[in-house]
Image (cartoon, helix red, strand yellow):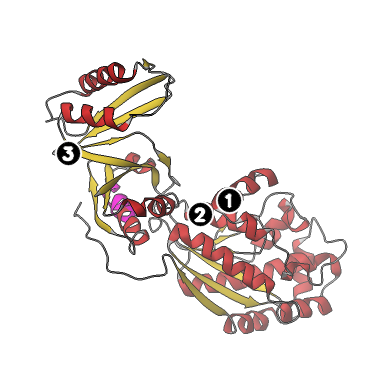
């Protein structure tokens, strides 16, 4: 049997409702590992311990845990009896063959009833390591950190920690509706809300059959990737070419992009209302394109009664691209496609659209009718990770 010790980050700062956050994180870990050979998942004194049956599963377990919001870090650990001598033996065996110039032992005694205090554990095990290896103790900048955590009846030893996604467990925040294009920005914006605990639904606007269905395929692949972080997702596909054709006929060219965006927000808001979402999410960053000036964002956002969240608003393209690479959406986002934003694009879109001019232009076509028609024709797809359903592992009570 092998064990993983999971530490959470800012959940430890929560007050009276901390146990609810931890329960939600345990449930998410349980769901993420449901089809693997996991025998036990338990929240134990400030950490979560996962016990699994085969070391062959470690690579996949690590890959999945790295995506789960709420996890600060995790490590493959050896479970031992809570005895300093046995722990020292295991440490010496575990570092055999490793090369280092310096080290430190970091011990945490979660149960104060254990008779040996943490500093003494560190000294005793550190002495064993020095005797076995000759490594130098360095408390400030060690090459190796040997971690020992002593609980009530057992101890855990681990040498290498892996970073988690941090943030808050999905399900602790509100539902939101993210407008998802095929580009780099909007998937990162959605991921940032997922990482804050928000269950995120997606809406993608396409111009099929006027254009190919390539943008829909990209949206599906992006949602599959993002579903690894929140385990289940919904994607709403909205046919937008008909609306664009109406706008093309009725609206002066400089205002078309702003009006396209206002129609998108209206549709997304109605879908959010029907699915119980409490805010809209966009990938807007100030000044990146003509529709994303502060003036235009204000005019576009004015049609929504729901808050419009723009988590990338102050980021530059390099920062957004780094996030996209990190979360695995970049390779899909840069694939060529034909999205609805390229259809009927005017040469010189307005960068400071006036509200009165936009509202006057919208009176030239049936906004309410187009909204109703678009929503009635929406195609909704559901995604789940992992896709294979299996009996749930046991969950220890908190």
- 315 or 213, which is in the foreground? 213
Q: CA distance from mark 2 to mark 3?
A: 37 Å
- For the residue carrying disc 2, how many other residues have a C-alpha within 10 Å: few (<14), some (14-19), or many (20+)? many
Q: Position of residue 323 (x, y in %)?
A: 59, 47
Q: Residue at x 80, y 66 (%)?
A: 255
Of residues 282 and 340, which is closer to you in this image? 340
CA distance for labels 1 and 3: 43 Å
Please tell me whether mark 1 sits on a helix, a strand or a loop.
Answer: loop
The disc label shown at residue 311, or none: 1
Label 1 neighbourhood size at 10 Å, few (<14), some (14-19), many (20+)? some
Q: Which residue is mark 3?
A: 154
Q: Residues within 10 Å of mark 3 (few under 14, many from 20)?
A: few
Q: How many marks?
A: 3
The residue wearing badge 2 is: 193
The segment highlighted magenta reads 17-25
Taking the spot 42% from the left edge, 23% from the top edge, the residue there is: 100
Residue 22 forms part of the magenta stretch: yes
Q: Label the magenta part by its dominant secondary structure.
A: helix
Say which of 204 and 336 sits in front. Answer: 336
Secondary structure beneath disc 3? strand
Tag 2 secondary structure: helix
């Amino acid at each position: 049997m092998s064990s993983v010790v999971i530490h959470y980050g800012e959940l430890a700062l929560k007050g009276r409702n901390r146990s609810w956050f931890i329960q939600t994180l345990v449930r998410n870990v349980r769901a993420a590992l449901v089809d693997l050979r996991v025998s036990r998942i338990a929240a134990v004194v400030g950490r979560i311990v996962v016990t699994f049956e085969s070391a062959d599963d470690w690579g996949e377990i690590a890959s999945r845990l790295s995506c789960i919001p709420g996890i600060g870090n995790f490590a493959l650990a050896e479970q031992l009896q809570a005895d300093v001598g046995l722990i020292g033996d295991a440490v010496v065996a575990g570092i055999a063959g490793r090369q280092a110039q310096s080290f430190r032992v970091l011990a945490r005694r979660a149960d104060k009833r254990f008779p040996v205090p943490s500093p003494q554990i560190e000294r005793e095990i550190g002495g064993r390591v020095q005797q076995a290896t000759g490594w130098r103790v360095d408390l400030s900048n060690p090459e190796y950190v040997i971690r020992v955590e002593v609980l009530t009846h057992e101890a855990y030893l681990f040498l290498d920690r892996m970073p988690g996604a941090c943030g808050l467990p999905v399900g602790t925040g509100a539902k939101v509706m993210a407008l998802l294009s095929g580009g780099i920005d909007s998937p990162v914006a959605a991921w940032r809300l997922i990482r804050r605990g928000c269950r995120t639904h997606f809406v993608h606007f396409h111009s099929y059959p006027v254009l190919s269905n390539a943008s829909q395929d990209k949206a599906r692949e992006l949602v599959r990737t993002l579903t690894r972080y929140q385990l289940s997702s919904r994607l709403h596909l909205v046919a937008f070419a008909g609306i664009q054709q109406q706008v093309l006929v009725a609206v002066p060219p400089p205002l078309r992009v702003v009006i396209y965006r206002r129609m998108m927000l209206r549709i997304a808001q109605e879908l959010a209302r029907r699915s119980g979402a409490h805010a809209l999410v966009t990938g807007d960053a100030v000044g990146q394109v003509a529709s994303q000036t502060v003036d235009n964002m204000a005019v576009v956002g004015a049609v929504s009664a729901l808050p419009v969240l723009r988590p990338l608003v102050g980021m530059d393209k390099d920062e957004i691209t780094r996030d996209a690479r990190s979360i695995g959406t970049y390779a899909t986002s840069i694939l060529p496609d034909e999205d609805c934003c390229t259809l009927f694009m005017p040469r010189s879109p307005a960068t400071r659209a006036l509200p009165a001019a936009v509202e006057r232009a919208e009176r030239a076509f049936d906004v309410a009718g187009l909204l109703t028609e678009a929503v009635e024709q929406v195609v909704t797809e559901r995604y789940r990770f992992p896709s294979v359903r299996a009996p749930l592992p046991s969950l220890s009570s908190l």
